[in-house]
Image: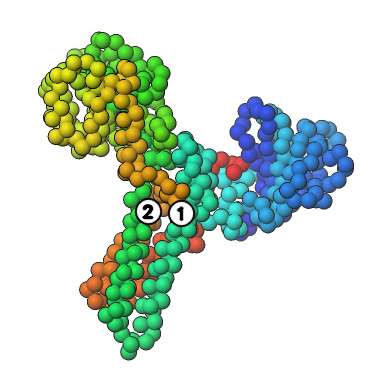
Amino acid sequence: MWEDNLQDTIAAISTALGEGGIGIVRLSGRESLAIANKIFVGLDKKKPAHFKSYTMHYGKIVDNHKIIDEVILTVMRSPKSYTRQDVVEINCHGGLLSLRKILDLTLKHGCRLASPGEFTKRAFLNGRLDLAQAEAVIDIIRAKTDSALKISLGQLSGSLSGEINKIRQGLLDILVILEANIDFPEEGIQVQDRADLSLGLTAMDARLNALLSSASGGRILREGLHVVICGKPNVGKSSLLNALLKKERSIVTPVAGTTRDTIEEMMDIKGIPVRIVDTAGILKPRNLIEKKAVRLARSQISLADLVIILFDASNKLDHRDRKLIKEVKNKNVIAVINKIDLKARIEKNEITGVFSKVVELAARSGKNLNLLEDALYDFVYQGKLPSPEFMLVSNLRHIHALRDAQKLVGEARVILADKLSIEFITQNLKDACVYLDKILGKNFSADLLDRIFMDFCIGK
């Protein structure tokens, strides 16, 4: 079905709707230049069909001699374009009316309105991008921080695809040896051959594991780290939120229980998109409002990727602190001892004995706040400093396929160690390659493509 759709010439508005300096209407397909000929009038009267590729031309879009807008028209000829088809981009004034009139005019002359992500889908189907690279496009558009953008750009350039291809080739090299033994069984697998095969499978398993170990950090950079600040009333939760945001977002008073509802903000901490939630103090509720506030706080804690539990350095731990410690000790936790600028009365050993990561700071003054930011950074990157070659797997579809492939490789290692029939190993490795091929789009279905591209904007 998609082969038929590739023959259509499609058009869409490729810039965000609303007022702006420039708006773009994009066309792709074999009739792009012919349609542009009908609606564009340049100063030199030349037709777009005669323009050189990668050139821009000033002129007007007209409909029956009526001027719609002054524009700059760009031509990118097949196969050296985003879609590997003839592409025309019309840069007009960024008003919604102008954009819609130009788009309607292209549809009137034979274009079809593009579906979500159809330009990128064509780039994939025409071999310009593999599927993992195509999926990186939407991640670039949605990137919330420089780090997320860098990871997505790396995937678009082929860093992830390159590593998956290396693993796939490693599995195929092992398959060649195994298939040769099946074809010539009288030779048999020698002891040294088994050792080499074992080393090869171990190496591929390690590479798969390295990719999967990055999945948690990759998902966080893609979706944001969900962090919840919790603690008993008046330990400084709102002050900490304000300090991290570097602005007064939460009301801070000496009165315990000032925060009744959850307060949620997005922020960029050292390149990590963080969705941070300030919750009501966990206490014994005195009324219906406080009861609902505490219930909501506990719900947020249960959903969090990471919990920051606050303690007041100027007070000894009480039963409320200890109860909260029990509630969060099975979560990912950074314990924060706040108010270190006051006289210390807290029993630190009761905290350090439970939590592996403890930060001491003063939220009101900002003292040691950088230590907490460093701890959040280490949580995402697991203590590894990103290098130019560093890559993170962030796409859930990729993660599932890698897990399935690793499981099959692990089973193949067990079969080899137990000296069972090598036919079982070959089947496992073939199936593992199938899962890797799904990531790259070497095999796919129309339903899969529809699911992937449905989240794209229409003009991309």
Amino acid on which the number 1 mark rests in the picture: Leu
- Crowding around mark 1 (Cα neighbors within 10 Å: few <14, some 14 to 19, many 20+) is many
Across and down, in percent, residue 102 comes to 73, 36
As drawn, is 310 to the left or to the right of 196? Answer: left
**Residue 280 at x, y = what percent?**
27, 20
Q: Which residue is mark 2?
A: 211
Which residue is drawn at the image coordinates 78% and 51% (left, top)? 52
Q: Position of residue 57 (x, y in %)?
A: 79, 41
Work out whether residue 397 can be spotted: no
The answer to which image quadrant residue 299 occupies is: top left
The answer, for residue 165, to whether it is visible in the render is yes
- Spatial CA span between label 2 and label 1: 9 Å
User: In the orientation shown, which residue stands out farthest toward the bottom?
Assistant: 186
Mark 2 vs 1: CB contact within 8 A: yes
Left/right placement of residue 131 relative to residue 318 reads right
Quarter of image, res 12: top right
Question: Which quadrant: the C terminus?
Answer: top right
Q: Which amino acid type corresponds to the residue marked 2 in the rendered image?
A: Leu
Instruction: Please name the residue shown 38% across and 73% down the image.
Output: 174
Residue at horizontal 61 percent and vertical 41 percent from the top: 459
Name the residue that disc number 1 marks: 160
Residue sitting at x 23%, y 13%: 256
Q: Is residue 74 left or right of residue 43?
A: left
Disc 1 element: helix
In this view, the residue farthest toward the right is 44
**Res. 173 mark:** none
* Vertical position of residue 450 compared to residue 371: above or below: below
Mark closer to the chain start, 2 or 1: 1
Q: Horizontal and vertical percent for residue 334?
A: 25, 33
